[in-house]
Image (spheres, helix red, strand yellow):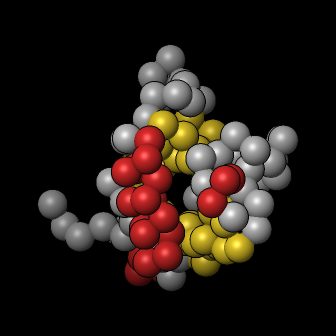
Amino acid sequence: MPDTTPRVVATEAALELIERLREMHGELMFHQSGGCCDGSAPMCWPAGEFRTGASDVKLGEIGNCPFWMSESQFEYWQHTQLVIDVVPGRGGMFSLEGPEGVRFLTRSRLFTDDELASVAPVEHGDG
């Protein structure tokens, strides 16, 4: 299989936080919030605690954790690579990093034409 451009990546700081959270909570998953309660933030959950469905797409993995987003939101973000970072501040009230004094943050950048030609496919959720 040819090399693909990942749709979602994480900074070193985000990967370190993911590992700490995994040590405390076990396997994890992410879902990019669609703008409701916690704005548009990447939410970190214990694996399986957030139910994904047919209207969700898996963009890839960060730190060996699946990263999901609603299909309708993906329509807006499909031409960008999501870069998950960590910044000081209060995390989403339902996201596992909240008590750590930091929060996950999504940055994005447009794919180049070459990257877009080789971007990783998404997987659709069950439902």
Left or right: 79 as drawn, with respect to 88: left
Residue 70 or residue 100, whichever sits in front? 100
The residue sitting at 58% across, 58% down in the picture is 78
Quadrant of the rendered structure where residue 119 is? bottom left
Q: Position of residue 54 (x, y in %)?
A: 53, 25
Q: Is residue 15 above or below residue 54?
A: below
Left or right: 122 as drawn, with respect to 1: right
Left or right: 89 as drawn, with respect to 14: right
Q: Position of residue 41 (x, y in %)?
A: 71, 55
The residue sitting at 56% across, 30% down in the picture is 50
Quadrant of the rendered structure where residue 19 is? bottom left
Residue 102 or residue 29, whichever sits in front? 102
Q: Quadrant of the N terminus?
A: bottom left
* Res. 125 in view: yes
Q: Position of residue 39 (x, y in %)?
A: 82, 52
The residue sitting at 42% across, 68% down in the picture is 15
Q: How many marks?
A: 0
| Residue lying farthest to the top in this orientation | 127
Q: Position of residue 49 (x, y in %)?
A: 52, 28
Residue 121 or residue 84, whichever sits in front? 84
The residue sitting at 49% across, 76% down in the picture is 13
* Res. 106 in view: no
